[in-house]
């Protein structure tokens, strides 16, 4: 069964006004799905239900075909938030925060996947460099990749990623796309995509509009039908 599946999910913050109106889709293992659509369409709400921050009013959110207990569900689904704030502390502390037990091998593995090995090497004290409350030493794109690396350490089967729109320069965007290609080899990705480059690198694109899946296909299929 798919790693994550929405089956006819309805949800409203106010039950009288549903925001999601029968959302169905399935994310295969190691699949990379992009969610696109206008602001207010329901993309963030889909994420909130995927991580079980809210439960559906109707329909189901399943992992591997099953409704798991809440804590098990949360262990399978990782979330990378949009602003990726860093904690006061070193880069190592930031990576290990909330990650559970992890050795140096694990750190090296996730840093390699996210393209951060050269970034760490360039810091004065490597992993033990204080990166500061606001992560002043790291660019927005690097902070994003630190957040992805941290998420990977807890070994989720699917990562939800709300792409930052504002902070990435072309180099940062390329580095993020490369990191996502690597990450997609070990787990599934669902990305709220604002940028064309991220949409293009997904294997499937869901167009969400006014609480329904208005289109679902590869990027080429959607271009042909529009
Ligand atoms: P984005 O377009 O990046 O998804 P939004 O502007 O839609 O951002 O939402 C920003 C935040 O405000 C989100 O956390 C969302 O849940 C919350 N939000 C959006 N609309 C409302 C609303 N009508 N009432 C309360 N919170 C809202
Ligand atoms: P998107 O991520 O596609 O921009 P959202 O899921 O943030 O869309 O929002 C979908 C709808 O739900 C919008 O009308 C938004 O105002 C509303 N909404 C989002 N979050 C909240 C919230 N916390 N409380 C009430 N309404 C919300």
Image: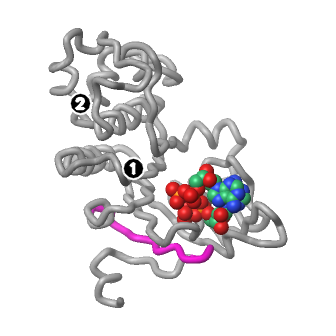
Q: Are marks 2 and 1 in contact (CB under 8 Å)?
A: no
Q: Residue furthest bottom?
A: 225
The picture quadrant where one finds residue 108 is top left
Residue drawn at x 37%, y 25% is 135
Give the x, y percent position of residue 112.
Answer: 23, 31
Front-lying residue, 179 or 17: 17
Residue 104 in percent (x, y) is at 31, 15
Mark 2 burial class by Cα count in 10 Å: few <14, some 14-19, many 20+: some
Where on the picture, by quarter, is residue 120? top left
Q: Nearer the viewer, residue 112 or 120?
A: 120
Q: Which residue is mark 1?
A: 164
- Judged by depth in the image, the label closer to the viewer, 2 or 1, is 1
| Label 1 CB-ligand 1 distance < 8 A | no
Specify start and end residues of the magenta stretch as a single range: 201-212
x and y, in percent, of residue 87 in the image: 47, 21
Q: In the image, is residue 110 part of the stretch drawn in magenta?
A: no
Cα–Cα span, label 2 and label 1: 18 Å
The answer to whether residue 1 is seen in the rendering is: no
Which residue occupies 44% across, 68% down? 36
Report whether residue 39 is seen.
Answer: yes
| Mark number displayed over residue 147 | none
Relative placement, left or right, of 101 versus 58 is left
**SS at circle 1:** loop
**Mark 1 Cα shell of 10 Å, populated few (<14), some (14-19), many (≥20):** some
Residue 116: mark: 2
Q: Position of residue 56 (x, y in %)?
A: 74, 60
Q: Under tag 2, what secondary structure?
A: loop
Q: Is residue 206 magenta?
A: yes
Which residue is at a point 38% across and 58% down the rendered structure image? 31
Identify the residue at horizontal 35%, vertical 90% (top origin). Answer: 225
Lateral position of residue 162 relative to residue 140, left or right: right
């Amino acid at each position: 069964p798919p790693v994550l599946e929405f089956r006819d999910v309805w949800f409203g913050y106010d039950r009288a006004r549903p925001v999601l109106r029968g959302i169905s889709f399935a994310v295969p293992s190691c699949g990379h799905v992009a969610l696109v659509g206008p602001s207010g369409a329901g993309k963030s709400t889909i994420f909130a239900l995927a991580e079980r921050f809210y439960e559906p009013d109707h329909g189901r959110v399943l992992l591997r075909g099953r409704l798991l207990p809440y804590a098990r569900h949360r262990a399978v689904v990782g979330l990378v938030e949009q602003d990726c704030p860093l904690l006061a502390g070193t880069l190592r502390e930031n990576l290990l925060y909330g990650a559970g037990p992890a050795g140096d091998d694990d750190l090296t593995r996730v840093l390699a996947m996210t393209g951060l090995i050269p970034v760490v090497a360039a810091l004065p004290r490597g992993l033990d460099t204080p990166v500061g409350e606001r992560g002043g030493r790291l660019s927005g794109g690097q902070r994003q990749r630190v957040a992805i690396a941290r998420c990977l350490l807890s070994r989720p089967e699917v990562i939800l990623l709300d792409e930052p729109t504002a902070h990435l320069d072309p180099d940062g965007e390329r580095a993020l796309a490369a990191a996502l290609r690597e990450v997609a080899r070990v787990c599934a990705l669902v990305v709220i995509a604002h940028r064309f480059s991220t949409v293009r690198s997904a294997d499937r694109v869901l167009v969400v509009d006014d609480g329904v899946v208005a289109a679902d296909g590869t990027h080429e299929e959607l271009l042909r039908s529009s």
